[in-house]
Image (cartoon, grey):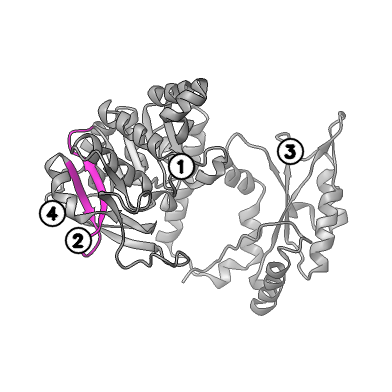
Amino acid sequence: EPDICIIELGGTVGDIESAPFVEAMRQFQFRVGHDNFALIHVSLVPTIGSVGEQKTKPTQASIRDLRGLGLTPDLIACRCEKNGLDEGIQAKISMFCHVQPNQVLAVRDCSSVYHVPELLENQGLIEFLWKRLNIEQTVKISEPLKQKGIDMWNKWNQLTTAQERLHHTVTIALVGKYTNLQDSYASVVKALEHASLNCHKKLIIKWIEASDLELETRSSNPVKHHSAWQDLCSAQGVLVPGGFGNRGMDGKIAAARWAREQKIPYLGICLGLQIAVIEFARHVCGMADANSAELDEHTATPVIMFMPEISRTHLGGTMRLGIRPTVFQPGTEDSSIRKLYGGGSTVMERHRHRYEINPELIDKFESEGLRFVGKDETGQRMEIVELSYHPYFLGVQFHPEYLTRPLRPSAPFLGLILAATNELTRHLATL
């Protein structure tokens, strides 16, 4: 079990939506005791007017409301512009919020969020929490674990320092149906960032609405259609993330076909894998009417089918969810993705889907060069697919973006960035 638990409580103090959670936090503090509970309150210190004066009233008001709900902050993290807190502002917040000056932290705008841990450490956050929670007396930290923490911190600083000196770029086309709201793909973007940082490349994402690649858009809005294809053709790699529904499906298939035929690195996640298989079935295997049962229930060639154990009528709570094993098949030791995962026989990744590749068509696909290198523990469900004669054409049924970390990037994303920058072969040779 962990020695320390970090809980993030979002929202705004005083809002009705967060009231039950604030009360739960108050009761939790009472139950574990004051000495085992530290609260950090994040508040905006805005700069108002042409004179650029920082205002502390919002912070004072939120602290007052928070105390009225039974919680008293141990630290106040003040979000402010890149110049930090003005002279006297820290003392003013300290005075009117009833905390010591060293309990007021300036969290200024940085060039990257990855600089924030160092920013907080320089203001004594670790030392304060060490004393506040009496960690030295309550937690036994072995020397190997302490050294592991030091090594991790050094690697983190090296990563963030190198980030400021990135000159070479890598351009990835993200083809989806929710690109108007880029936060829809927040985890995917973070996974790309982690992989790019690991490869010492500055990431550029070309956001492409899948429907803009379709023939219908060429007729209705030729400028948008041309722009989308220009972005796709100029990208060094193509990524099709997960999703649902019919809209933009033909555009995603067109993107997968472009990547396959032009030998452009491709990564398909969940639906992106299914897209790659449908495209392969139509244009390589000669199955012109190949489709997914999700899009056409009565398709004559259901390349993608409803999983038999999943209810067709009750959609709530019926997905194949959670972390599950994927087993690399015998004879796949030369697989790029297996090597990127470390060469082991099994990987654990998180899933969220209702549909799977039709197992009756696997032999046909493999005879044409589509390798199903990873399957579930039963060997019946396809999890990872590679194209044998392509530099990097990968589809995964799971969502690798959920387990990525800045110092340990997700293997499929790392492979995409390495392949997009022509460094995959060299990297695999070192493994």
Name the secondary structure under disc 2.
Answer: loop
In the image, residue 221 lies at what x, y percent? 52, 24
The residue that disc 2 covers is 379
37 relative to 303 in the view: left or right: right
Looking at the image, residue 334 lies above or below residue 358? above
x and y, in percent, of residue 106 in the image: 72, 45
Q: Residue at x 41, y 26 (%)?
A: 232
Dot in front, 1 or 4? 1
Q: Which mark is residue 300?
A: none
Going by the numbered disc 1, the residue's amino acid type is: Arg
Question: Which of disc 2 and disc 4 is earlier in sequence?
Answer: 4
Q: Which residue is mark 4?
A: 330
Q: Alpha-carbon neighbours of circle 1 within 10 Å: few (<14), some, or many (≥20)?
A: some
State the extent of the magenta-drawn residues as a range: 370-390
Name the spot of residue 268 as percent of width and height, x first: 35, 42
Mark in front: 4 vs 2: 2
Label 4 Cα crowd, 10 Å radius (few <14 / some 14-19 / many 20+) = few
Name the residue tied to disc 1.
247
Report if residue 382 lies within the magenta region.
yes
Q: In the rendered structure, does residue 52 fall within the stretch colored magenta?
A: no
> Viewer-proximal residue, 112 or 386?
386
- Circles 1 and 4, Cβ within 8 Å, touching? The answer is no
